[in-house]
């Protein structure tokens, strides 16, 4: 199959954005619980990053209310083993009140990937899963699923 030349000749997938209602509490959750690197180059925004060329910008909507998200709309963070998934879920349950975690779902294994979902104080969903770069490489190498 011949590739179609894109209309936008981009060089980098720079970032996406999410909203938060409390910058300090959000930063505490993102750094202390999820282990993400955070910088705040603007008064109204902080950037979250975990290496690589892509980041997520967290924009504060002061006096706003976070929009409820569906669990299918989530970020996935990879950990090194199934035991780390178990430990992360136990920590999420134990520290829900400290970090404003709204919901912690059960651990599931789907297509060989073991993980669980949690909903943060801004109603975003995060999946903590045992998945590797090789898993994503194989997924993209296999291409589209047949109809």
Image (spheres, rainbow, N blue to C red):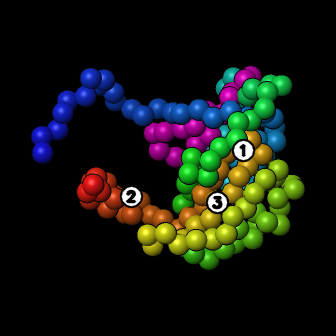
Q: Nearer the viewer, mark 1 or mark 2?
A: 1
Percent across and percent down for residue 47 are 63, 34
Looking at the image, is mark 1 or mark 2 earlier in the sequence?
1
Q: Horizontal placement of 38 versus 103: left or right?
A: left
Disc 3 secondary structure class = strand
Q: Residue at x 63, y 71 (%)?
A: 107
Q: Residue at x 49, y 39 (%)?
A: 54
- Marks 1 and 2 in Cβ contact (< 8 Å): no
Determine whether, in the image, residue 115 is placed left or right of residue 58.
left
Label 1 to label 3, Cα distance in Å?
12 Å
- Residue 45 magenta: yes
Q: Is residue 24 visible?
A: yes
Q: Quick check: can you spot residue 47?
A: no
Which residue corresponds to the image point at 33% horizontal and 27% vertical from the top-left? 10
Q: Position of residue 126 (x, y in %)?
A: 63, 53
Q: Is residue 43 above or below residue 85?
A: above
- For the residues bearing labels 1 and 3, Cβ distance under 8 angstroms: no
Q: Which span is picked out in magenta? A: 43-59
Q: Whole-percent x and y of residue 59?
A: 68, 28
Instruction: Tell me which label, 2 or 3, sits earlier in the chain.
Output: 3
55 over 147 or under it: above or below = above
Q: Residue furthest left?
A: 2
Local packing at callout 3 (Cα closer than 10 Å; few below 14, some 14-19, many 20+) is many
Q: Which residue is mark 2?
A: 136
Point out residue 2 in the picture as x, y percentages from the top left corner.
12, 40
Label annotation for residue 78: none
Circle on res. 123: 1
- C-alpha span from label 1 to label 2: 26 Å
Q: Label 3: which residue?
A: 117
Figure check: 113 above or below 25: below
């Amino acid at each position: 199959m011949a590739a179609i030349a894109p209309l936008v000749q981009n060089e980098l997938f720079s970032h996406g954005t999410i909203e938060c209602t409390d910058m300090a509490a959000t930063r505490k959750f993102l750094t202390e619980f999820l282990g993400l690197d955070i910088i705040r180059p603007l008064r109204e925004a902080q950037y979250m990053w975990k290496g690589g060329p892509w980041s997520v910008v967290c924009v504060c909507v002061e006096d706003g209310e976070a929009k409820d998200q569906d669990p299918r709309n989530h970020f996935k963070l990879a950990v090194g083993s199934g035991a780390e998934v178990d430990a992360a879920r136990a920590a999420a349950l134990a520290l829900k009140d400290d970090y404003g975690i709204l919901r912690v779902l059960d651990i599931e294994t789907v297509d060989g990937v073991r993980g669980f979902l949690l909903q943060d104080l801004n109603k975003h969903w995060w999946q903590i899963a045992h998945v590797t770069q090789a898993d994503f490489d194989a997924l993209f190498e296999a291409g589209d699923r047949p109809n």
